[in-house]
Image (cartoon, helix red, strand yellow):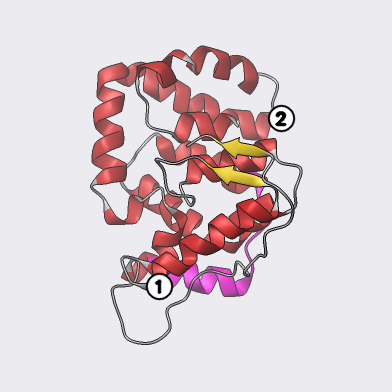
Amino acid sequence: MVASVLLDYPDDARQESFGVVVQAVATLPAAIAEPFNRFLEATRALGPRELTIHYTSTFDQKRKCSPYLTYYAAGDTRKRGMALVRFVEAYRAAGWEVNDGELPDYLPTVLEFSALSDSPIAQQLLASHREGIEVLRAALENVESPYSHILDAICYSLPKIDDATRERYLKLVAEGPPVETVGLTFLGTLAPFAPRGEAREEVNA
């Protein structure tokens, strides 16, 4: 949940919540708390307005810094719509519904779902797009963004990547997300889900 709050757009309300986040970070294991503390220290040095400007110039204007996970697997291709549908199906299979106003693959939303849901589907959503998370992490490090520290904490909490994921990750680092093509486009390793029961809670986007 700490990663979800800090990685979301830092409007005034979000930045006001950073004080509560500091308290939460203090309860985390040292290995995970350390990168969060580095981010918080860097943002204090930037100041509120500069942090907002940095967020927009990083996540909205840099192709490899997209906070939307399916973008890394499908890019701006027609196949991305199918990938987004799979995210919605996954949420619904876990009994959740995504609020209108944000795409279901928005990383802070996925992290919030992972923090609040007891369903194993939450971890599947992150694991199935691990290469995209690694590309985002590398891109943020490359531009020396303090947000790279948040990705460090996220990746530290996830299982070690396997060889196939590493190969896709390195290819994405070299080539970037795919462009429109004819034929099949990789949609991540997330399998389709069938809705199960009624949605019980909404993920705030």
Q: Which residues are magenta?
A: 157-172
Q: Nearer the N terminus, badge 2 or badge 1? A: 2
Front label number (2 vs 1):
1
Kind of residue indicated by mark 1: Lys
Q: Position of residue 129 (x, y in %)?
A: 54, 61
| Local secondary structure at mark 1 | helix
Residue matched to label 2: 29
Q: Position of residue 86 (x, y in %)?
A: 55, 63
- Who's the residue at 41% across and 63% down the image? 72
Above or below for 8 versus 190: above
Q: Is residue 131 magenta?
A: no
Looking at the magenta stretch, what is its main secondary structure?
A: helix
Q: Position of residue 52 (x, y in %)?
A: 29, 27
Dot 1 alpha-carbon crowd within 10 angstroms: few under 14, some 14 to 19, many 20 or more = many
Kind of residue indicated by mark 2: Pro
- Who's the residue at 63% across and 34% down the image? 32
Within the image, what quadrant is residue 157 found in? top right
Residue matched to label 1: 79
Q: Position of residue 163 (x, y in %)?
A: 61, 73
Distance CA(mark 2)–CA(mark 1):
39 Å
Q: Quadrant of the N terminus?
A: top right
Q: Is residue 35 visible?
A: no
> For this rendering, which residue is in front, 155 or 85?
85
- Who's the residue at 44% across and 13% down the image? 16
